Image (cartoon, rainbow, N blue to C red):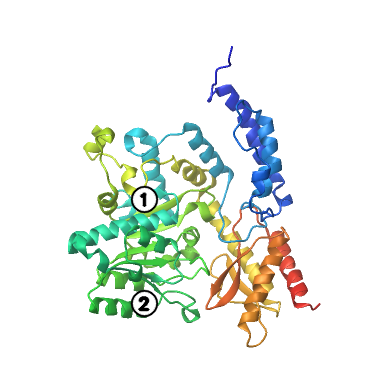
Amino acid sequence: MEKTLKPMDAEQLREYGHKMVNFIADYYKTIENFPVLSQVQPGYLRDLLPDSAPNQPDSFQHVLDDIQAKILPGVTHWQSPKYFAYYPSNSSVAGFLGEMLSAGLNIVGFSWITSPAATELEVIVLDWLAKMLKLPEDFLSAGQGGGVIQGTASEAVLVVLLAARDKVLRRVGKDALEKLVVYASDQTHSALQKACQIGGIHPENCRLLKADSSTNYALSPELLSETISQDLAIGLIPFFLCATVGTTSSTAVDPLLALGNIAKSNGMWFHVDAAYAGSACICPEFHHYIDGIEEADSFNMNAHKWFLTNFDCSALWVKDRSALVRALSTNPEFLKNKASQANMVVDYKDWQIPLGRRFRSLKLWMVLRLYGLENLQCYIRNHIKLAKHFEDLVAQDPRFEIVTPRIFSLVCFRLLPPPNDEYCGNNMNRELLDAVNSTGDVFISHTVLSGKYILRFAVGAPLSEEKHVNAAWKVLQDKATALLGNP
């Protein structure tokens, strides 16, 4: 007689769940033994796995063995204390437990009725986080605004751009789409360009204004005003401005107050992307970097970057939730219910692109409750202190230079080029990056600023300590010595 499949058997879950938690805990205990950057070649896994799925069930232990032997070698270890690339993607016990509970309940919370707790907890924790950030009351759920968890900052900028687009087209007519203009600096995340493509904004009307070292790569209000004036003169319609607090390349901070005033005087939607650096603004000494946020129509930070909340959890606040709902709402018969029809509840399906959504507020709630504001502030401050330490180490070696002022926990630096030979300098730094990352002992990434190839050292992994920063610097020094051929 065939054995009946019981895909969610409580006792099997208990047995396998304990084994998986032990597997993950052991992974974290030994995470430093892995090369941070995966050293496999493209296509490596095809040779290690069968051509088709099994007809009969495999044992759980066999699956765990395959993860250890075949999957982990192909993983780049974002949680390693030796990971200093891109920006961090934090994991924590609290975040992991919240994610586990969300997976266990496995609800699809597109509207209030589908799981009232999922909607109401999200409203509450985003109000909590807004208050920690001291955002204006206009962003709280008690008024016309409120918060919503998106998957990523890319989704956040897309939904607010669509809301802004539809809002202006209702005023000037839908045939004016080809005249709509978006503004940002050329340091703004490429997600804005993708949002423009999806939103039907003509590519030539996406103004990415040049930023340089004279403003530490922040957007110049004077250049913005001049560009808007030129566009108005030829009959175009400025409608959306995106500022960044902590750009991807160098953590540049755009001047929010000045930019917000320009946006307001031109009737534009003003969005602030603080995906990375927003977390730091829970600390009073860094809050001034979002001075002027009162002028914004929307504000976004990624709790999954530097706020100990497992991916994905991108917090977006808007001052006027009706603008989002008007742009994104659908109301098919099969989703109608009394609470929604009576406008008594929030239905987050109307604040996002997809219909379905996970119970992501659980992990953010657990992070806030199990750690508390003071511990989270100390966590952020420690990473900034470690970055300052690395900056000091670089400054002491005359072969290197700091390229932009360090603001948060990112240090932008490079190996100095030979006199009057930037091309050679760029190649040297590219080779240094490859040499350092191929060791497996550290992982850093790069950017290009004003034509210069720059190395980025981003402190933010939860397990990173001063000894890991020192070890990374030693690898950089040793590889620089080998590259330059001097002692």
Q: Secondary structure at mark 1?
A: strand
Residue 33 seen from this side: yes
Q: Residue at x 44, y 72 (%)?
A: 186
- The residue labelled by disc 1 is 147
- Three-letter amino acid code of the residue under disc 1: Gly
Residue furthest top as drawn: 1
**Disc 1 to disc 2: CB gap under 8 Å:** no
Q: Residue at x 63, y 36 (%)?
A: 21
Q: On the picture, is 38 further left or further right than 283?
A: right
- Three-letter amino acid code of the residue under disc 2: Pro
Quadrant of the image for the C terminus?
Answer: bottom right
Q: Is residue 279 above or below residue 7?
A: below
Q: Position of residue 231 (x, y in %)?
A: 28, 76
Q: Position of residue 79 (x, y in %)?
A: 62, 51
Give neighbour class at mark 1: few <14, some 14-19, many 20+ (Cα, 10 Å): many
Give me the disc on residue 221. Answer: 2
Foreground: 334 or 89? 334
Q: Position of residue 387 (x, y in %)?
A: 62, 66
Q: Position of residue 315 (x, y in %)?
A: 42, 52
Q: On the picture, is 168 further left or further right than 22?
A: left
Q: Residue at x 55, y 53 (%)?
A: 89
Q: Residue at x 70, y 45 (%)?
A: 29
Quadrant of the image for the N terminus?
Answer: top right
Q: On the picture, is 147 further left or further right than 95?
A: left
